[in-house]
Image (cartoon, rainbow, N blue to C red):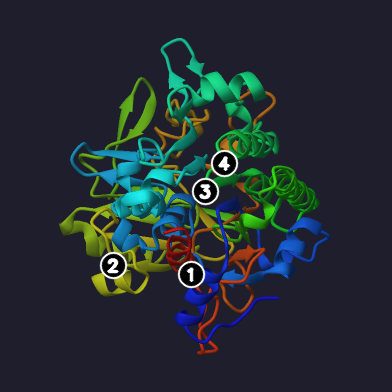
Amino acid sequence: MGIIFKSFVQLIKIEASTNLKHTIIINTVGLEHGHIESRLPNLSRIANEGECSKIEPVFPAVTCTVQASLLSGRLPNEHGIIANGYYDRVNHNVCFWEQASGLVMTDRIWDKVSKQGGEKKSTFKSALLFWQNTMYSSADIVVTPRPLHMAESTIPWCYSKPVGFYDEKLAPKLGEFNLATYWGPFASRKSSEWITNAAKYALEFARPNLMLLYLPHLDYSAQRFGKSSPHVQDDLKYADELVGELVEKASKLGLLDQTQFIILSEYGFSDVSSSVSINLKLRDAGLLVTRRIKGKEYLDYEYSQAFAMADHQIAHVYAKQNAIKATKKVLEKVHGISDVLSSDQEKKKLKIDHERSGELIAISNKDSWFNYYWWYDNSAAPSFANTVDIHRKPGYDPVELFIDPSTKSVPLDTSLVKSSHGRPPDIDSADGLAVYMSNRKGFVSKHTKDDFMANSSDIGKYLIRLVT
């Protein structure tokens, strides 16, 4: 499978010769090249009809960062999405899983089309379903979870554009989107099912020229059970069925001959056996301090000399200038950390040299991941630790995928997590590599150099050329 082009001129000619009116991009998280032969008829058919290749994710290989590169053709040091969160140095606060489109500091596909002006701008329609950093964007249709946090409860809701698209169109037709199936201990394939049904609705009634949808359920089973588990195999088959439903829908609407289906993933997984309590190590060294409030310990951003914003297998470590050397010295001795980036040159090599990045960036071993914990005794853990609270935790917490049946809360047991991602991929073993496939030939997956491997931003450049 796959195809090699000798020049971009050939690519442009091929693109010009196709009569494409619709491009549907399906982001199937955790899909890998090796999965395609795993009794997945719909995905295999797409790959065999067109092309398929392994893709190197940009660093760090986490959702928001990779998605920003896929949609802009830019690298993290250009678009500024340096992880799933960042430290706001002005407000002394970690912002995690924020959805505003303006956080991406460059144009994305739909922005490029809009700026073309003329007939293209007036006739082109884009639809974004559950991709990150899409709220308030210039796209025509947007649907993304945006629960309303009230004092007495949380109202599950989705932001949509145009106003009322979710409340007046999707919810009455499909039912309310169940946020509990999207993240937390009850996250399941039901989330991907709802998103696929929303995509079928949008395809029928809006006929977008560009539609992007996000299928998250493989992500859950990989982290819970490991990348090679039977649960992942079952969820792969279900993802294949959902792709088949979308192809069938396009066929029934008479759009198939004019549609390019692109299936891609953000990253692949590595199985893990341990977790690194990076903030606890900084606390042991006297670099991180806490404030005790009503018996609970909270991270003190003001007086800490250094702290880590943990995100899967990487951590942005924010350190005061006079503490950078001492912090690096501590981290380099921590078991489970493979690299500590400190110089501009080291960060530039991985295209992560951006003002939002930490003064240091820690990378875990392949079989480890970073948790955000800083307490010695679980009884002193902050009030949000045992809850699904993606905004107040200064880092990503995969343990939120589990529940302690005795307490009906999130257990503080990092050994439950079986797979992770984020670090640079292992090219030889293919651990961590993403995948790209399409039912049409066109993407340059390899230059004349045999050692070339495309990355997420290369796909982004191609996607922009495809629709502009």
In front: label 4 or label 2 = 4
Question: Do callouts 1 and 3 mark residues in contact (Cβ within 8 Å)?
Answer: no
Question: Do callouts 4 and 3 mark residues in contact (Cβ within 8 Å)?
Answer: yes
In front: label 3 or label 2 = 3
| Rendered-image quadrant of the N terminus | bottom right
Left or right for 10, reference 310: right
Q: Residue at x 51, y 23 (%)?
A: 157
Which label is found at residue 342?
A: 2
In 3D space, how far apart are the residues under numbered discs 4 and 2 (Cα atoms)?
Answer: 48 Å
Q: Which residue is mark 3?
A: 209
Identify which residue, 53 or 468, lies in the foreground.
468
Question: Do callouts 3 and 2 mark residues in contact (Cβ within 8 Å)?
Answer: no
Q: Is residue 238 visible?
A: yes
Which label is found at residue 207?
A: 4
- Label 1: element kind: loop
Of marks 3 and 2, which one's residue comes earlier in the chain? 3
In 3D space, how far apart are the residues under numbered discs 4 and 3 (Cα atoms)?
Answer: 7 Å
In front: label 1 or label 3 = 3
Of marks 1 and 4, which one's residue comes earlier in the chain? 4
Q: Quadrant of residue 362?
A: bottom left
Q: Is residue 284 visible?
A: no
Within-10-Å neighbours for mark 2: few <14, some 14–19, many 20+: some
Q: Amino acid at mark 4?
A: Arg
Q: Which residue is mark 1?
A: 455
